Amino acid sequence: MHQQAFLLDWLTRPPQTNEPRRSAVLIAAAHWLTARYHLPLVLSELGASAGVNLIWDAYALALPGRTLGPADPALTLSPDWHGPLPRATPPKVIARAGVDLNPLDPERDRLRLLAYVWADRLTRMDRALHAVARLRPQIERADAVDWLQTRLATPRPGALHLIFHTVAWQYFPAAAQARGTAMLAAAGARATAAAPLAHLAMEADATPGSAALTLHLWPEDRQIALGRADFHGRWLDWQAPPHDAGLAPNAVP
């Protein structure tokens, strides 16, 4: 009976994949943003789950002829990379927080998290969970859009506030998406060159089989297509515009 109750409880909760390889997108985008703004980052992740992608700066990204990230990474990501390499401009994260309707604890829920991973990927996930357990990023149990409203209301002088989500927004109800989009636009209207706002999304679109990588910047109010990526981070087609092509902060294509 105990086993039956355990399994029935397990089935009441939706799967949470927590794929740390999606952090390859976050690392590349953070280097691109740092090269552009030269400001430290405040991170806000929607759909953070256990937080394995909220600590992307603890990982290294191995690229052809170049590695981005710390010298002693908790994990090294090696996606099949296509496109130009991002400039190596190490980002500095000064604050981070995430939100999830059902946040998972990297220690208490470790077996649940590993159960959603293919057997050949257990080592990578295990290392990511150990890093999250050590760093303990703040993840609040709440509605993502309600939480976002509070995060956007807090001034971030001298920092770039980066809102991001990886394969999460697409599961929000349409009303929540509309409300969140309106909140971001309103916060963007208040953004300044000294306190810019960025919204990074890795989500499904009309093209099947991979995720679109989009970046919306304020106060410029410009949206940039960064490329595409495999949903689980196995490959990345990076198409971000270069910074050395007359790309001033107010001239993003």
Image (cartoon, helix red, strand yellow):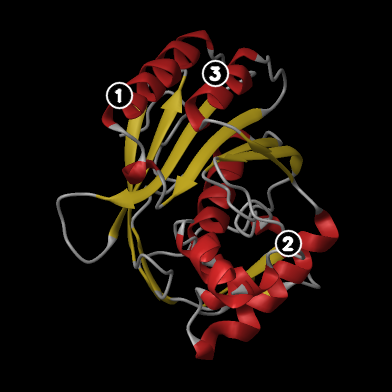
Crowding around mark 3 (Cα neighbors within 10 Å: few <14, some 14 to 19, many 20+) is some
Q: How many marks?
A: 3
In the rendered view, tell whether residue 130 sits above or below residue 218. below
Crowding around mark 2 (Cα neighbors within 10 Å: few <14, some 14 to 19, many 20+) is many
Q: Earlier in the sequence, mark 2 or mark 3?
A: 2
Q: Are marks 3 and 1 in contact (CB under 8 Å)?
A: no
Q: Are marks 2 and 3 in contact (CB under 8 Å)?
A: no
Q: Earlier in the sequence, mark 2 or mark 1?
A: 2
Q: Which residue is mark 2?
A: 58
Q: State which quadrant residue 245 falls in.
A: top left
Which of label 3 and label 1 is nearer to you?
1
In the rendered view, tell whether residue 160 sits above or below residue 226. above
Task: State the residue at coordinates (69%, 55%).
Answer: 55
Percent across and percent down for residue 98 are: 63, 40
Residue type, mark 1 in image: Ala
Which of label 2 and label 3 is nearer to you?
3
Q: Which residue is mark 3?
A: 149
Percent across and percent down for residue 26 are: 53, 54
